[in-house]
Amino acid sequence: MELPVRLTIFGAKPVSFESAVVALEPRKISVRSARPLGLRTPLKVETPDQLWMGEVVEVYRDGQSWLAVVQVVHALRDIPDLTRLANRFLGKVDRSETEAEGTRLSAAP
């Protein structure tokens, strides 16, 4: 499995680039990168609907690329759902979402 992701290295000037997750564990992610990542480097790993933050705890050379193991400190999943929920709490409900929900309710038996 290779899941395309966007990696951001935190620092005075954050650096972002494309990468791939090659393994997922509950608290660790293995990431393949074209550039080396230093130990203890703080990272953000993003997909359109997920975000993980952590730090590099292991690094290996793997042919032309690098494999880094990231210890996950924070994880957010289902970001679109979380965004809709936050908008509802703030009173920013999308009209199309309300209409779609009304359609689902009226179609219920």
Image (cartoon, rainbow, N blue to C red):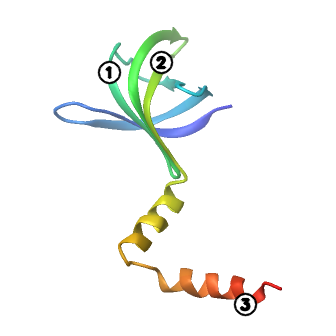
CA separation in Å, label 3 and label 1: 52 Å
Say whether residue 42 is left or right of residue 20. Answer: left
Q: Residue sitting at 53 percent across and 61 percent down?
A: 81
Q: Which mark is residue 106?
A: 3
Query: Percent x, y for residue 74?
Result: 42, 35
Residue 94: x and y in percent read 47, 80
Name the image quarter holding residue 41: top left
Task: Tell me: residue 71, above or below residue 3.
Answer: above
Q: Which residue is mark 2?
A: 68
Q: Earlier in the sequence, mark 2 or mark 1?
A: 1
Helix or strand or loop: what does disc 3 sit on? Answer: helix
Residue 41's disc is 1
Which percent across, then down, holds residue 60?
49, 9
Neighbour class for label 1 at 10 Å: few (<14), some, many (≥20)? Answer: some
Cα–Cα gap, marks 3 and 2: 50 Å
Sequence order check, earlier mark of 3 and 2:
2
Residue 44, by quadrant, is top left
